[in-house]
Image (cartoon, rainbow, N blue to C red):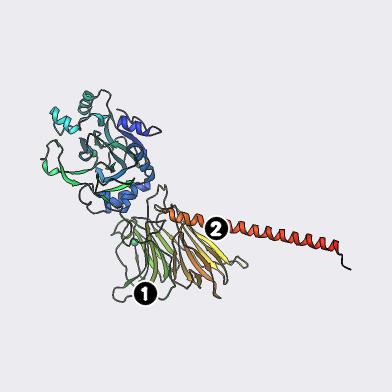
Amino acid sequence: MMDSLASPGANTRALFASQGFLAPVALYTKPQCELILRHFRSLRAPYAWWKGYAICDRFIYDIATRPALLDVLKQVLGPELVLWGAMLIERDLGQVHIWHTDFESSALSGGFASVWVGLENTSAGSSLQLISGSHHFGKPIQQVMYESGVPRIETSTATVANLASKIDPTAQFVQPAVSDGDAIVFDGRLWHGSENTSGRKRTALLLQYVKSDTPVFIPDMSQYEEGQWHWPFRFTTKRAPSILVSGVGNSAGHDLLVAPSACSQNNPLKTFVDRGSDYAEDAVARWRPYPFFSGYTTNVEAMESHLSVLSAGHSPHPPHAHVEEELLLVLDGVAEILITDDDRSEGRVEVLGPGSFVYHPAYQHHTIRNRSDAPVTYVMLKWQSCPLEVEAPLQSHVFHWGRPNVPEGSDPFWVRVVLEAPTAYLTKLHAHQTVLQPGGGYAAHFDEHDVAIIVISGTIRTAGQDVGPRGIVFFPAGELHGMHNPGLETAHYLVFEFHAPCRSEETRKIIRRADDLSIWARVKNILRKQKRAVQLKRWTENRIKRFRRQPPQ
Ligand SMILES: [Fe+2]
Ligand SMILES: [Fe+2]
């Protein structure tokens, strides 16, 4: 038995063409694997058929289009790529998946690539088993076994290897040594199976792609009896719903769907200002949310915010978990935050007073409750974006920070960092508190990240408006904004920055233009000074000349 024939390298395309697979291909980090598992386990039934998770939601689209993965797929299939299948495959210990060729991708002309990624308890003893070179045999294994009279239940590797060697003596049995997060990328015609000898349940993700000019039909499984060999393959007339993930697409091959959006209100966010006021509670419902904004930015695929008033003795819902990451900042009152393992347990309880905030990663169970005798007012921000290859994303954490004692003679614009860490969706989540003296501030500028500002006390002037306590301002990346304290009182506010790889060339252009403008402004300033120096020099020289010609009497 061989571990692996070779890993992908410079000659990826040739290797894939000759052996029919590439492995191991390092794809996801451990936290990404855990997030993918949680996401799939939170989903309802797939759309249209058992591999219909391919088109279900934005999260799956994002993990199926990670740049490292698309790079490998483009090398082996070319630039025109369609995603048509996605599913989670769970195998109990000792469970066998009999040798087969996948129906949908078995066309002799090829053009298919399947990506099998180990997510949980992946090892050489639980990974996929393959027959290298079997994509060139011209027959799926179901056909070969059927024609050879081998019973369907036959699972022995020796039998399969023997059948393969009769077709091509160089073909080999392979079980690549892969770990969680590693992929095996294989030709859709390849013979494969699995036997989980790892001693624990093993879970893998299957993503399936094809060239955009090649149609994919959903198999007709109703045609087969239990225990019968699935041969000949039969298909329905329905095409698998699919999404273009690279290239311009080919309508002859597929009924292509557009990539799903992460947010229900699929609109680009603009600058948002809520100047702050007293928010009333709902005496009947005992929890009253005031929606602020919902949409996407060039940084994140979904961003939503609301302020809520939670009445005494109430909780809005049992602990829940969701795909978004979340920040919750208490403005008034004292709240209890529950951080739990599921929707029933009590878990960890944290007490948050005014100004304290909590961060929850995606799929962390949590809720808020008010056990005091006064209402709690809080503001919440939650967002979703591409799961990034982060090794140690931020976990649930509570941040307490008091009103700072700013030393005498400090800068009128005083800043202290409260939080700075990567998350599953952000290269950096940053928070700082600012104390802004009357008359202080900064000039208008653009940022490459989204910014949320929440005023704790005093008044700030930004986006042309005066914003007071409990006010929130949101500037998506690329929106011009400045800051000024117009009042007589010191202003105190909290800033959250959401840093992520910019997804829009348009915003990148705006930022570049802003950089160019600031450089140009500095250059003009220097030129102006130089021009003034030249004029002064000339004026002085003329004065000297005149003085020499006509000295004062
Ligand atoms: Fe398969
Ligand atoms: Fe939540």
Quarter-of-image position of residue 293 = bottom left
Who's the residue at 43% across and 73% down the image? 276
What residue did someone put label 2 on? 517
- The image's mark for residue 432 is none
Characterize the local packing of mark 2: few (<14), some (14-19) or many (20 or more) Cα atoms within 10 angstroms: few
Q: Give amino acid for label 1.
A: Asp
Between 257 and 460, the residue placed more toward the observer is 257
What residue did someone put label 1 on? 373
Who's the residue at 68% across and 59% down the image? 531
Characterize the local packing of mark 1: few (<14), some (14-19) or many (20 or more) Cα atoms within 10 angstroms: few
The quadrant the C terminus occupies is bottom right
- Decide if residue 206 is on the left or right side of residue 32: left
The answer, for residue 204, to whether it is visible in the render is no
Q: Give amino acid for label 2.
A: Leu
The answer, for residue 78, to whether it is visible in the render is yes
The image position of residue 466, as x and y in percent, is 49, 73
